[in-house]
C-alpha cells in the first residue's frame, strides 16, 4: 500500500508540470481573446498613442508611441523638470532596435532589452504569445488588491523571466513582474495596469500604467489613441550615427 502511494505521488509530481502548463496556455489564450488579439491581428496595421508620464524628482514628460506592422516602433519622451529639458527616444525598424538619450548616448539594443521593447509595444504579441515565450507555467491563484488572479510564470525566448497576474473574472492583465537584464544590470520591473479601454472593436489597452523600477515610481497615462494612421517607414529608421558607424 505504501509502495502504491509512493508510486502515485511520483506520477503526480511528474504530471503536474504538464497539467499546469496546459492551464497556463488556457488562461493566456482566454486573455488574448478578451484583449482583442484577433481583432488586432486582422484589422490593425498601425497604432499611435499620445500621453503623459510622471516620474521621480518632479520630472514630467510628454509621450508619443508609434507602432506599425512588421515590428516597427518609435517612442519619444520629452522630459522637463528641475530646470532641465531632454528628449529620450527608442525605436525599431523591423530588424534592429535602438535607444537615444543624453544620459546613455545612442546605442543599439540587443537581447532582453530589445525583446522587452518589442513585447511591450507590439499590439499583436498578445495573440501570438507562443512565438515569444519558450516556457509558461501556472503557479497559483493570488489576489492583486481585491481581485483574484491567475498567477502565470513566463520565460521569454531571450531568457527574461516574467510573472503575469490575470484577473480570474475578466481575464485582463492586472500586473506583471519582470526580471530583465539591461545596460544597468538586472532590474526588477513591476507594472500594474488600470482603466482598460476598448479602442477598436474589442481591442483593449490600459489607459494608465504604474511602473516601479529599483524603488522608483513612474506613472503613464494615455490621453489619445489613433488606429490605422498612415505612418511613413522613415519614421522608424535608425539614427544616422548608427547607420554611418555600420558602413565604416
Image (tube, grey):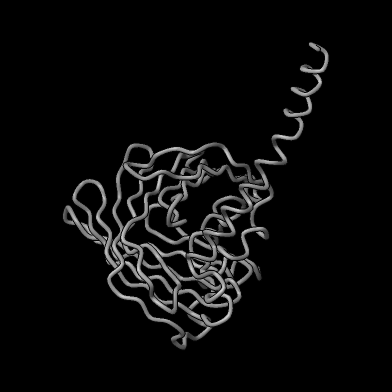
Q: How far from the left and from the top, in percent, is residue 94?
A: 61, 72
Quadrant of the rendering where the N terminus is positioned: top right
Q: In front here: 104 or 158?
A: 158
Q: How far from the left and from the top, in percent, is residue 108?
A: 56, 59
Q: Answer above or below: position of 42 versus 7.
A: below
Residue drawn where x is 51% and y is 39% of the image: 185
Q: Is residue 64 left or right of residue 118?
A: left
Q: In front here: 123 or 93?
A: 123
Residue drawn where x is 54% and y is 52% of the image: 113
Q: Is residue 8 left or right of residue 76?
A: right
Quadrant of the rendered structure where residue 142 is? top left
Q: Is residue 26 left or right of residue 209?
A: right
Q: In front here: 169 or 54?
A: 169
Q: How many marks?
A: 0
Q: Answer above or below: position of 66 versus 131.
A: below
Q: Residue furthest bottom?
A: 230
Q: How far from the left and from the top, in percent, is residue 122?
A: 53, 67
Q: Residue furthest top?
A: 2
Q: Is residue 81 left or right of residue 156?
A: left
Q: Residue furthest left?
A: 83
Q: How far from the left and from the top, in percent, is residue 77?
A: 34, 64
Q: In front here: 161 or 61?
A: 161
Residue drawn where x is 45% and y is 72% of the image: 203
Q: Answer above or below: position of 72 versus 29.
A: below
Amino acid at each position: 500500500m505504501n509502495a502504491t502511494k509512493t508510486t502515485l505521488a511520483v506520477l503526480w509530481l511528474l504530471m503536474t508540470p504538464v497539467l499546469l502548463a496546459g492551464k497556463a496556455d488556457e488562461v493566456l489564450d482566454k486573455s488574448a481573446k478578451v484583449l482583442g488579439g484577433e481583432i488586432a491581428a486582422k484589422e490593425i496595421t498601425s497604432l499611435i498613442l499620445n500621453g503623459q508620464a510622471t516620474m521621480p524628482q518632479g520630472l514630467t514628460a510628454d509621450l508619443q508611441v508609434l507602432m506599425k506592422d512588421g515590428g516597427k516602433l518609435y517612442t519619444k519622451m520629452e522630459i522637463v523638470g528641475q530646470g532641465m529639458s531632454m528628449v529620450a527616444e527608442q525605436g525599431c525598424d523591423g530588424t534592429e532596435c535602438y535607444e537615444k538619450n543624453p544620459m546613455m548616448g545612442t546605442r543599439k539594443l540587443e537581447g532582453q532589452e530589445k525583446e522587452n521593447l518589442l513585447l511591450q509595444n507590439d499590439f499583436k504579441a498578445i495573440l501570438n504569445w507562443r512565438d515569444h515565450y519558450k516556457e509558461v507555467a501556472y503557479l497559483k491563484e493570488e489576489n492583486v488588491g481585491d481581485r483574484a488572479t491567475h498567477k502565470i510564470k513566463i520565460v521569454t525566448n531571450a531568457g527574461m523571466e516574467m510573472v503575469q497576474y490575470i484577473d480570474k473574472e475578466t481575464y485582463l492583465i492586472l500586473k506583471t513582474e519582470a526580471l530583465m537584464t539591461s545596460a544597468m544590470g538586472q532590474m526588477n520591473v513591476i507594472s500594474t495596469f488600470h482603466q482598460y479601454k476598448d479602442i477598436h472593436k474589442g481591442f483593449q489597452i490600459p489607459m494608465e500604467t504604474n511602473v516601479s523600477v529599483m524603488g522608483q515610481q513612474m506613472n503613464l497615462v494615455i490621453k489619445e489613441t489613433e488606429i490605422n494612421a498612415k505612418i511613413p517607414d522613415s519614421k522608424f529608421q535608425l539614427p544616422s550615427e548608427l547607420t554611418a558607424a555600420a558602413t565604416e
